[in-house]
Amino acid sequence: MNIKTTLKTSVAAAALVAVAAPVATSPATAGAINAGQDKMSVSISGQVNKEILYQDDGTDGYTSVADNDASGTRFRIVAKGNVTESVSVEARMEAELQSSANNNATLANKGRGTGQNNFNNRVTHVKFTHKAAGSLTLGQSWEAADGVQFQDQDGAWMTAEAVSDHANNALFRTSNGAATAQAVLWSSIDGGRDDVIRYDSPTFGGLRAAASLSNGDEWQIAAFYGGSFGGISVGAGVGYISGSEDVQNDSVAGSIGIAHDSGISVLLVAGETDFTSGNAASATATRPDGSNIYGKIGYDASLNDLGTTSFAIGYGETDDLAANGVTVEMLNFGVAQSVSAIGATMYAGATRLSGEAGNGTTNFDDFWAAYVGARVKF
């Protein structure tokens, strides 16, 4: 090899090292990126959550590849900085990319869900936090009561939770197999995400409060508690959700999750929606209040070196919530295996929904959903 070839090889190798070196970050700095403002720290993170989903309405069945909307595929960019010693600011952008979300996958659309071009804005907010006075959030963000019915303390919540993600855009069939227009829906009563102005109090003894006002004049207030004592950990939430200018259906809902050091946990959920409070359109509907209840038992165990193995089984019922005169029962169960070395979770489970309409005059066939999948965080 002549000197010219040697020099070319050396320069190429040096260039490769120079380009590759900034990419190979250590775990301690993974996710950190250079900020346009040197006073702000910026991080990027996210997850991919995919599953194989089988749905059966009692007459037909179909298998598809879907996103588990219980904790869907997403990425986020978060910038943080200090205004003063007491005041900090956060700017957050979070987007969801789900080509076939399981809560939109049905036998009719062959599991295609929301489609290949789905790109949803989850969060784009600015948040100011004072160490003693709490925080103020402005933008597309979580409403105050978001999470009040999901205070799960078990590790299998992605497979068994208080909502029918794996089926709720499908349709029931009657007991003789006839198609209906009734959605297979066990309805949760919870806050969501919207353009809001939101206040969060500081946490005192594990207790914090939140209040938000969304576009459309919908306001919410909520209180949350999290704490541990005597080998027991508790998570609880309760909230009030007002109606908006469009639909004034006031709701009260909450949940409490309790876990013991032995690995056993329980979750209790309840809520009620008043469909006749507020504007003339809802007041003339003569519709009774809707309600939901749900209970779950979980068990987290150390069965292998990968991480925690979690089991859960739950049962719930909604009355007059999916529609007037409609009762829906949900049974769900599942298992989840964490892989702590790479921040992943593998899971499998099933959900059965059954119901009746016309206050019991029409019975629906059972609807089954079975699923196996994995979520990988980064």
Image (cartoon, rainbow, N blue to C red):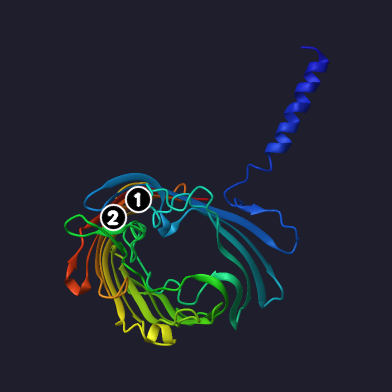
Q: Indicate the position of residue 202 as horizontal and vertical percent values.
A: 54, 80
Look at the image and tell me whether residue 346 can be seen. yes
Q: Nearer the viewer, residue 68 or 106?
A: 106
Look at the image and tell me whether residue 312 can be seen. no
Q: Indicate the position of residue 233 as horizontal and vertical percent values.
A: 35, 71
The image quadrant of residue 272 is: bottom left
Locate residue 365 relative to residue 324 in the image: left or right. left
The extreme top residue here reads 1
Q: Residue at x 66, y 71 (%)?
A: 89
Using the image, determine if residue 289 lies above or below residue 61.
below
Real-space CA distance between mark 1 and mark 2, rounded to the nearest whole angstrom? 26 Å
Bin the neighbour count of mark 1 within 10 Å (Cα to Cα): few under 14, some 14-19, many 20 and up. few
Using the image, determine if residue 252 lies above or below residue 193.
below
Q: Which mark is residue 108?
A: 1
Bin the neighbour count of mark 2 within 10 Å (Cα to Cα): few under 14, some 14-19, many 20 and up. many
Image quarter where the N terminus lies is top right
Please state which of the two labelled residues, at mark 1 or mark 2, is closer to the viewer.
Answer: 1
Q: Which mark is residue 334?
A: 2
Residue type, numbered disc 1: Ala
Residue type, numbered disc 2: Gly
Locate residue 93 relative to residue 2 in the image: left or right. left
Q: Indicate the position of residue 298 as horizontal and vertical percent values.
A: 28, 62
Q: Which mark is residue 145?
A: none
Locate residue 62 relative to residue 70 in the image: left or right. left
Mark 2 or mark 1, which is nearer the start of the sequence?
1
Q: Residue at x 72, y 57 (%)?
A: 35
The image quadrant of residue 150 is: bottom left
Numbered disc total: 2
Q: Residue at x 31, y 78 (%)?
A: 290
Q: Indicate the position of residue 231 as horizontal and vertical percent values.
A: 32, 70
